[in-house]
Structure formats: C-alpha cells, structure tokens
Image: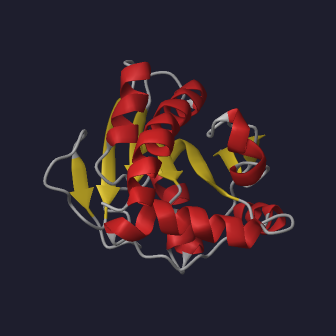
Amino acid sequence: MSIVGSIHGRMVYARRVEVLARHLASVMPPHASIVDVGCGDGRLTAAVGRLRPDTSVSGLDVFLRRETFVPVRLFDGAVLPLADHSVDVVMFVDVLHHTNEPMVLLQEARRVARQAVVIKDHCRDGLFANATLRLMDWVGNAPHGVVLPYNYWSSSQWRQAIEHVGLRQVRWQTDLGLYPKAVRWIFERSLHFITVLS
C-alpha cells in the first residue's frame, strides 16, 4: 500500500464510516429493510445496521469480495435483481458518480423502494470542485480498481435528475463533518451531501 493510501486508510476511511453511519442511520424509517447498492465489503452497511438494530441490511455490488460484513449479492451494475417495491430503502453511498448511466440506477431504485431512496454523493459546485473531487476519488478508489469516470453533477443537475425520475426530495444535508476540522475547508465545503427521496 502506498504512503498516501496508508494515511487515507488511517485518517479518513475509518472516520468516514463512523460519521456516515450515524448520518445514514438517523434518516432510516423504523424497521426498514435496507439494500445498499454498490456496498463494497459492506462495512458501512453493517455499521448502519448496528446503529439501527430495528432494521435489516444487505448489499448489492458488481464485485463480490471474499469477506463481507453483510450479505452481498452480485448485480450487473444496471438492473437491481429485486422485485418492484420489495425493500423499504435503497441506499447509494458514493456510487452514482462511478457509473456513466446514473439515471438508470435512480429509476431502478424508484422501482424497488417502498419508502425511500437515500443517496450520499458529491456536488460539483464552486471553484476547484471538480479537481478536488477527482483527487479524493483517485486516492480513495484507484488502489482498489474502482471504475473512475469522474461523473460528478452539480446540485442543480441532481435536483433535475431527482425530479425527472419522479422522486421527491424530503431532505438535503451538506454539513456532514466527514473530515477533521483542519482540512474541511479543502475537502468538504459543499462537495458532499446526503439526500432522502420519497
């Protein structure tokens, strides 16, 4: 592992899982069945489940890891292998910007979710936003062979896409506190958001 990768793992990844799990757990409906699309090894998914023991959590991913923290099913990256309205919540955490067709997955999430679609992703708003997001994506994902199309949308593009697929935004939060205070002005700003859609 590179020096940058080692520092990222120690100082960013563990904190990100802890902070995101708290945010995501707080927006889940009671007793929800949650499927995390693009869950990787399911570490974050499992953390949400621990914070919300009234929920059931599972994952879908295009790659199956040898070891996972939750049950994970393989899917093709486009069609969710789930029946219409078969889970309460479909969750995407930093996934949609890794696909060239995010609208396809949004439409699939709308088809499958009974109650909500929860998204954590990025906004390409402001000076140097694109360059900052590309750097963060490369450091966090390139060593793991994750596809990096750098397909970031502005906040207005997100809102148009949400409206286009027939979902309604009930929550939009950008102050997530993912990074230590000393570097938030570089890596946080308004680049990250969590939204809850119904």
Which percent across, then down, holds residue 85? 45, 49
Q: Can residue 88 be seen in this view?
A: no
Q: Could one spot residue 99 in this view of the protein? A: yes
Expressed as whole percent of the image width and height from the top left, the position of residue 197 reads 66, 46
Looking at the rendering, which quadrant does residue 170 occupy? top right
20 vs 112, nearest the viewer: 20
Farthest front residue in view: 3
Instruction: From the viewer's side, name the closer residue of 49 and 103.
Output: 49
Give the side of residue 173 with respect to residue 147, left or right.
Answer: right
User: Residue at the spot x=41%, y=70% of the render?
Assistant: 142
Check the image and tell me how it is coloured. Answer: secondary structure
Dividing the picture into quarters, in which one does residue 27 lie?
A: top right
x, y percent for residue 12 = 51, 43
Please identify the quarter of the rendering in which residue 26 is found: top right
Rendered view: 5 above or below 183? below
Q: Is residue 161 above or below residue 109?
A: below
| Residue 2 vertical placement versus 146 (above, below) | above
Q: Position of residue 42 (x, y in %)?
A: 32, 44
Say which residue appears at 51% left-offset and 57% top-offset.
Answer: 109
